[in-house]
Image (cartoon, rainbow, N blue to C red):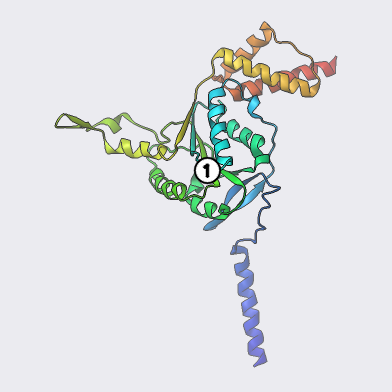
Amino acid sequence: MNSKLDAFLERAEAVLARLEPLLPAQREPIEWHECLAARWQREGRSGYLMPLHVSLEMRLSDLIGIDNQRDQLGRNTKQFLDGLPANHALLWGSRGTGKSSIIRALLAEYAGAGLRLIEIERDHLADLPRVVELLQGLPQRFVLFCDDLSFEAGESDYRVLKSVLDGSLEQAPDNVLLYATSNRRHLVPEKESDNENWKNVDGELHPNEAVEDKIALSDRFGLWLSFYPFTQEHFLSVVEHWIDVLASKAGLQWQRDEALDILAVRWATGRGNRNGRCAYQFARYWVGLKLLEQAND
């Protein structure tokens, strides 16, 4: 009898040893009083929130030339933090114009008031109900942040996502809000062929249902904020700001002049875009170059 029991236990241990690597690891609950941000990580059929160490250096005051967008999203976030009605937000427009930066700057601005940020990828948005469930009842206020939310031609995932957003957003507790960024206002490519086959019935035009189906995804967001390409003057103002910030940290004395402006414009022209990201990259290049020249003198 003992030998049979021993054999059974040995087999059970062997089975557990093979199954254990397939089981999800035990996760410690996040201490939201100390942790300011997390990322939703897919694991098997479920997932978990992975704590992130984030920099709070980016402030709202660093975002030059997008005052209207900054103020609108700031007010919406303040309403959310105060327990007042607030909208889910879609930030759309040209790349590098500050869409993601605004959301990260909001965390730096309002972390002390209980704001927390959770990053979730587009492909994981089907897990929204699970994420919302984990956050329900917590005293902090959570912004779910989905960067670069868009779909390519031929993808039908947006229909599934539309249903998930409907259910998750409408039933979300009052401490959860969704902010998404995209280069497209309607998130899904629209083609000229979408407008074919319009019908005239009793003098009334009925657009193709495919167009309405695609546009409906964006309607899940109550607040739309548009971001446009920078003018040259705007671009140079952002360059000046970031050079001033970086030079001050390094103790570098500098002065804006025409030669600097020409160099910055050439830098942007070489990249085919004038935006905040390009301005920041030029500022790093220029300040680094001047510090190197200073060290070699």
Q: Quadrant of the C terminus?
A: top right
The three-letter amino acid code for the residue at tag 1 is Leu
- Secondary structure under badge 1? strand
The residue tagged 1 is: 177
Residue lying at 41% horizontally and 37% vertically, measured from the top left: 218
Task: Please state the total of marks drawn on the protein image.
Answer: 1
Q: In which quarter of the image is the N terminus?
A: bottom right
Residue lying at 54% horizontally and 20% vertically, measured from the top left: 273
Callout 1: 10 Å neighbours few (<14), some, many (20+)?
A: many
- Give the percent coordinates (x, y) of residue 228: 50, 22
User: Would you identify the image quadrant in which residue 206 lies?
Assistant: top left
User: Would you identify the image quadrant in which residue 63 lies?
Assistant: top right
Front-most of residues 151 and 135? 135
Residue lying at 39% horizontally and 33% vertically, measured from the top left: 189
Observer able to see residue 288: no
Up the image or down, 218 lies above or below 45; here it is: above
Residue lying at 51% horizontally and 20% vertically, measured from the top left: 229
